[in-house]
Amino acid sequence: MNHKPASFPVDRQAPLVHKPGHMKSIKANALIPHEHKRSRYRCLSCGTTENMGRRRYCSVECRQKLRLRLDARMGLVEVLNTRCGTFSFSETLIMMDILPYGTSEIFSFLYPRSPGKKPADDFSRMADILGERWWAEKRRTNKRFLASQHVLEQAVRNYKPLTSVKPIITTFSSVKKTSLLILNLERSDLFSPELKQLIKNSFRQQAKIHHPDVGGDSDIFRKLHQAYEDMISWSKNPTFIRRRGFTDKWFYDGDKKKWVQPLPEITT
């Protein structure tokens, strides 16, 4: 094959990925976000904490940039026969962990953060280098399998639990968080056999305060009534959402061949 696919663009000026021995020493001294408690209001795409408030991303554009870079280099994880994978970063490193089909061993690719660059930029550089190495070995051996094995040899063999890259399916209700807050209900109340009565009691209690006939604010009462209607409707036909992923890192689903952004944190 004479032409490289778009999924493996090459940056010949990029520094080499650290050799496995060097990468192990880096890992020992680095802070990897999912191994420690993540700062709750740090952007999950670039890591900034400036003007974050309670947001998970500093901007839609920042989130989309990382997603586009991950998607553009999807050919790399595909040729490595990836069943599950994750992408995360710290202030000093980016990390891509992959679990290939047919093995229980996790392979970790580490790459140093570049000053002034975002994780999306560093991921592109790392993927470009690994892609060039794959193609060089493919040309030498004319074997895709050997080329993939050659790239996997650049990784750190990691004996983390499989759950670090293979998430369980998370099930959570489709109820709006604002409806729970307005009615002072907890998510655990959604599983109560007395849910309808809890909703009615909460509504009646707050209606005594916020109903316009007793001097309450009409806008507040309107929101209260809407939350009541939404919750009563849900209690008659409870629906739940099932998702696979992590709250603190991007997840690659090999079965669907797609990257999944971090899931929202469910609070009670």
Image (spheres, rainbow, N blue to C red):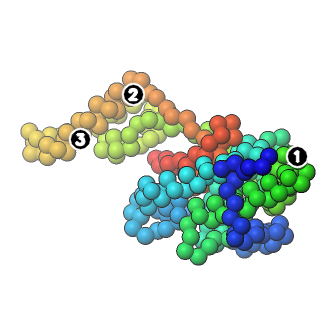
Residue 130, located in which quarter of the rendered image?
bottom right
Camera sees residue 176: yes
**Given contact means CB atoms under 8 Å apart, are the residues at marks 1 and 3 in contact?**
no
Question: Mark 2 to mark 3: distance in Å?
Answer: 18 Å
37 over 230 or under it: above or below: below
Question: Which residue matches tag 1?
Answer: 143
Label located before the other in sequence (1 or 2): 1
The amino acid type, in three-letter code, at marker 3 is Lys
| View extreme (right): residue | 141
**Residue at the location (44% across, 41% down)?**
187
Label located before the other in sequence (2 or 3): 3
Q: Is residue 243 or residue 224 the one in the foreground?
A: 243
The amino acid type, in three-letter code, at marker 2 is Ser
Structural crowding at the residue carrying mark 2, measured as other residues with C-alpha within 10 Å and reported as few (<14), some (14–19) or many (≥20)? some
102 over 54 or under it: above or below: above
x, y percent for residue 129: 73, 62
Q: Is residue 60 or residue 51 the one in the foreground?
A: 60
Question: Mark 1 to mark 3: distance in Å?
Answer: 63 Å
**Residue at the location (59% across, 64% down)?**
121
Question: Which residue matches tag 2?
Answer: 235
Circle 1 SS class: loop
The amino acid type, in three-letter code, at marker 1 is Lys
| View extreme (top): residue | 236
Residue 223 badge: 3
Circle count: 3
x, y percent for residue 254: 69, 40
Label located before the other in sequence (1 or 3): 1
